[in-house]
Amino acid sequence: MLANGAAAVTAAVVTVSGAQAAPAPDVDGSAPTFVVPVDPGPIQTRHAEALRYAEEHPGSAPLGANDFRCRPGSDHPNPVVLVHGSDSDSYSDWAALSPMLVERGFCVFSLNYGSDGKPGKYARADIAHSAREVGKFVEQVREATGAVEVDLVGYSQGATVARYFVNRLDGAAAVNRWVGVASPTYGGIMFGLVPLLRMLPYPDRIAEFLTSEAISQQMQGSSFLAALNAGGDTVPGVEYTTIGSRYDEMIQPHTNIALRDPGAVNLSVQDLCPENRGGHFNMVYDPFALGLVLQSLDPTVPAAACAPVPLGAGIVDMIVESNS
């Protein structure tokens, strides 16, 4: 069932009401490092509208997420942890997928991670630090639900954060599936700006100054991604799936989305639905792409209908909303 009102939470998470979020203390009881939103917002069908709602209602949770009373059933024994993208939060990126998952019987959880102090924005801090936050949240979810493993779904930077947790922080023991949506696995060019930055001295420092540390770490050619992928971009024991678009505005060539080790499943929207030309910002609100996420978590889910999506769908709206 969809959550009704603020979720009841375990002792590890403090519930608050109103336009607030629940600070989640570190496992050792130190100061909070991430927040768990608990006030459910409405279902959204467009990314820009979800972003607008998130900005107007800070601390909103995607509908159905973070009900710590949820106990996984035999059909879906793994809780799903959703990990949002850069300069975003869990509501703005997951206000479509979360209720879809809950309706199908999944227990769903999502956090706001990676704050660097900029009000209302997350996923800006060092990705390795953010991955540790995700790891702590995963432990809270497992303890609350009694689940042995979780499934991770990450969008954009969230995919890299989740994969760092799995591959570099021994998260594989707690994770069954990793699903990356528009994952900058081998780096992005950010509308073609990264190659220009690479012509300047200290491009990573410039990018960090203009945007955030996390953005600089996701650039094509970054030392961070080189270290993460060194020795193999997957580890044994976890099922990996990437879902990408040939028309991704941030990640080109689009093959940079794919994992390159044997055993990973790499899905392209256009290979399965050629008339869908949606890109990076459209992915988490595109019904066909979300259908691929559902099928990656539960292969019995019927395929979503293929429908035309114009090139550049949602970009202008997102740029306007992000700068309004």
Image (cartoon, rainbow, N blue to C red):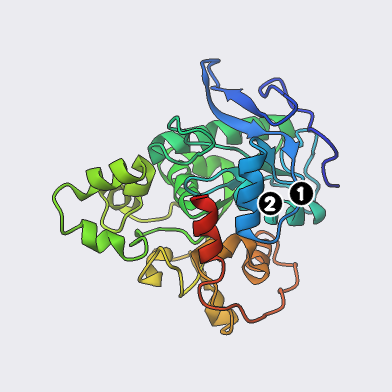
Bin the neighbour count of mark 1 within 10 Å (Cα to Cα): few under 14, some 14-19, many 20 and up. Answer: some
Instruction: From this view, report whether residue 200 is shown above or below residue 119.
Output: below
Circle 2: element type: loop
Residue 249, horizontal then vertical, whole percent: 43, 67
- Identity of the residue drawn at 30% across and 43% down: 208
Q: Is residue 221 left or right of residue 285?
A: left
Instruction: From this view, report whether residue 238 is shown above or below residue 16.
Output: below
- Identity of the residue drawn at 45% across and 69% down: 248
Residue 262, horizontal then vertical, whole percent: 43, 66
Circle 1: element type: loop
Q: Could you say which is closer to the camera, residue 243 or residue 50? A: 50
Q: Could you say which is closer to the camera, residue 87 or residue 56? A: 56
Residue 300, horizontal then vertical, whole percent: 75, 67
Q: Could you say which is closer to the camera, residue 33 or residue 309? A: 309
Residue extending farthest to the front is 324
Residue type, numbered disc 1: Pro
Query: Residue tagged by mark 2?
Result: 95
Q: Which label lies toward us, 1 or 2?
A: 1
Instruction: From this view, report whether residue 213 is shown above or below residue 291.
Output: above
- Identity of the residue drawn at 67% across and 41% down: 109
Residue extending farthest to the bottom is 274
Residue 227, horizontal then vertical, whole percent: 29, 48
* Contact, mark 1 vs mark 2 (Cβ under 8 Å): yes
Residue type, numbered disc 2: Ala
Query: Residue tagged by mark 1?
Result: 42
Q: Is residue 112 left or right of residue 105?
A: left
CA gap between label 1 and label 2 equals: 7 Å
When asked about the image quadrant of residue 190, the answer is bottom left
Q: Could you say which is closer to the camera, residue 24 or residue 105? A: 24
